[in-house]
Image (cartoon, rainbow, N blue to C red):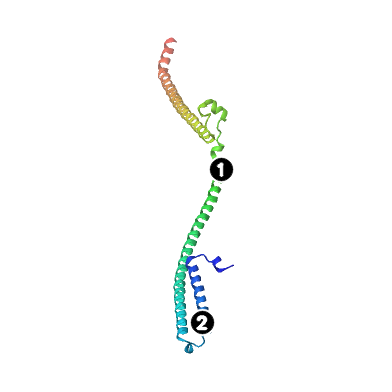
Amino acid sequence: MATHDIVKEPNLVAALNASRDARVQALALVDQVTATGPVESASAEAQFEISKQQKLLITHLAQVRGLHRAATFSTRKTKAETAEARQEVDRLHLQLQNLYYEQRHLQGEIAACESYDHTYQQLPLIPVEEFLALKPEHAEDDENALMIARIEHERTEREGLEQKRMELLKRKQKLISDNKKRKDDLANLDKELEKFIDAAKPIQKLFEKNIT
């Protein structure tokens, strides 16, 4: 494969072309000197032609040096840009890897949440059919909304039952208190009756004497 088929960068192509021209000119100068012989013994016309060819070669070499310098700077710039682009690619790749790991972590968390045996699943809720019979407005709810409504219904029912229990407990305490008060009243009445009987004994004995 030819060099020009591989190298496409403009500065390098120009440098290769200038190098080729300088090589051709150098070979032409060598041929000229070889054909002329020693320069000292050559004719003025031949020396002029050799000098002309030398100037052309120097011009080509100067172009080669300039283009080589430009190509070097361009290569350095390209390397710097390539390194910067590689760093950006590496950074983006690292971000992608982090996102991939985060995705896997979130998928694991979601799976754990979906498989978690939550306490609400153990609540003794009334059957769905019975709940919908009581609350037909929830017939079109999705699974989550229906579950929330059933839990809320259960909470309301339990709060109502707890309130009734507290009311019954208060009534029980009141009945116990009333019974105790009545028992105390009866005990006091018994004492008063015994006192009355004791106080009436002398009168009873007096009546008994008068009768006899």
Tell me the crowding category of disc 2: few under 14, some 14 to 19, or many 20 or more residues within 10 angstroms, Cα based. some
The residue positioned farthest toward the right in the image shown? 1
201 and 125: which one is in front? 125
Above or below: residue 125 compared with residue 53: above
Which numbered disc, 1 or 2, marks the residue closer to the eye? 2
What is the three-letter code of the residue carrying label 1? Glu
Above or below: residue 100 compared with residue 208: below
Instruction: Measuring from the top left, give residue 53's x and y in whole percent.
Output: 47, 79
Instruction: For mark 1, give the secondary structure.
Output: helix
Instruction: Give the numbered dot on residue 32.
Output: 2
What is the three-letter code of the residue carrying label 2? Gln
Tell me the crowding category of disc 1: few under 14, some 14 to 19, or many 20 or more residues within 10 angstroms, Cα based. few
The image quarter in which residue 189 lies? top left
74 and 197: which one is in front? 74
Above or below: residue 212 compared with residue 73: above
* Location of mark 1 (residue): 114
Residue at the image position 43 percent from the left and 10 percent from the top: 211
Instruction: Measuring from the top left, give residue 88's x and y in whole percent.
Output: 48, 59
Above or below: residue 70 compared with residue 175: below
The image quarter in which residue 184 lies? top left
